Image (cartoon, helix red, strand yellow):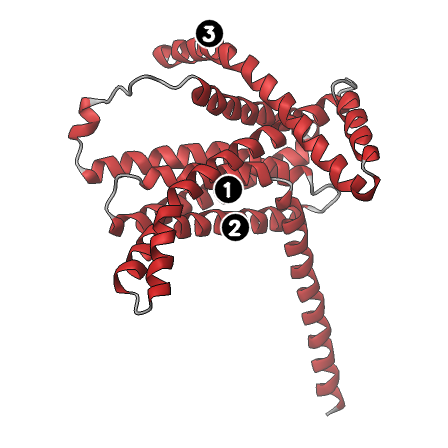
Amino acid sequence: MSGLLALLDDVAAIAKVAAASVDDVVGQAAKAGAKAAGAVIDDAAVTPKYVQGFSADRELPIVWRIAKGSIFNKLVILLPAALLLSQFAPWAISPLLMLGGAYLCFEGAEKVWHVLHPAHHEVKDPAAERQSEAHLEEAKVKGAIKTDFILSAEIMTIVLSELPGLGLAMTAASLAAAGLMITAAVYGGVALIVKADDVGLHMAAAGRLGLTRRLGVGIVNAMPKVLKGLTIVGTAAMLWVGGSIVVHGLEELGIAEPGHTIHALAHAAGAAIPAAEGAVAWTAKAVLDGIFGLLLGLVLIPVSGWVIAPVARLFSRSA
């Protein structure tokens, strides 16, 4: 009996260690995933457009297909690449982060540019219009998964940069947990967003109480504004996170500006309002990082159009 009790005690101790390890993995993943907020918000803001134009019964299946593609991107392609990077080229993490941050700045600035200089007309592709809904769905899903790959690469790199000093197994587990949690949060949120108008219509049409019907009408009327607001928040988050990544990377490379000026201005703003010094300083820094990100992105727009795009077309022709 004493032997059995000792065995059970050992099993309980092992279970406690395993539970603590799981807690550590989830805690590290959540902490690191929070740093990728800008890319995550942008991912959630971008995805709903891929289900526009399809029947209501195809919305959730399309979101699920994109979510599965996102999991494949993160766990099968990017996770091994991140582990190899952390083991054999940790020095490359900061430059890759800066490259991803610059891309976020470019994407955010391009959205701002299109708002300020909207196209007068949209050129429609006749071939695309003649596609069957199934072929169009396939093309939309593939396009969404490609976009997700770029954003997922940035997310996984940010998460990796926040997991220093961990062993290979712990790093892999934390990256996988962060990838799964972020994917669930993004595409779970997207699913709720794209079906909210259907829920509102059902409440408005079938609600037994007048309050329920009015709430349904309110949801339907609010969804266009919610989507627009989500796009604005996603763009601001891209510029903020992208700008802060580049500024921090420049400081690590020994280039004090513009980081020194941003820190000084944010500190001065916080000192001007002592009652909320921390919050004001943080907000000021985020705004200044976003302004830097916007300016960098505006510079990158012509660079992309005049240099990167022609070079990419040249390589695609030669291939």
Looking at the picture, does residue 53 appear above or below residue 259? Answer: below
| Label whose residue precedes the other's in the sequence (1 or 3) | 1
Assign a secondary structure to mark 1.
helix
Disc 2 marks a residue whose amino acid type is Leu
| Label whose residue precedes the other's in the sequence (1 or 2) | 1
- Residue wearing tag 3: 306
Closest to the observer, 242 or 177? 242
Direction bottom: furthest residue: 1
Relative placement, left or right, of 31 versus 126 is: right
**Which of pointers 3 and 2 indicates the residue nearer the eye?**
3
Residue 314: numbered disc: none
Q: Is residue 92 visible?
A: no
- Residue wearing tag 1: 74
| Label whose residue precedes the other's in the sequence (3 or 2) | 2
What separation in Å lies between label 3 and label 2 (alpha carbons)?
A: 38 Å
Say which residue appears at 68% left-offset and 37% top-offset: 161
Assign a secondary structure to mark 2.
helix
Q: Label 2: how many residues lie within 10 Å, few (<14), some (14-19) or many (20+)? A: some
What separation in Å lies between label 1 and label 2 (alpha carbons)?
A: 8 Å
Closest to the observer, 287 or 258? 287
**Quarter residue 32 falls in:** top right
Numbered disc total? 3
Closest to the observer, 288 or 12? 288
- Residue wearing tag 2: 180
- On the image, the x and y values in percent for residue 100 come to 58, 27
- On the image, the x and y values in percent for residue 203 come to 32, 61
Relative placement, left or right, of 49 versus 78 is: left
Say which residue appears at 25% left-offset and 52% top-offset: 57
**Which of pointers 1 and 3 indicates the residue nearer the eye?**
3
- On the image, the x and y values in percent for residue 287 come to 66, 29
Q: Label 1: how many residues lie within 10 Å, few (<14), some (14-19) or many (20+)? A: many
Instruction: Tell me the quadrant of the picture where the N terminus can be found.
Output: bottom right
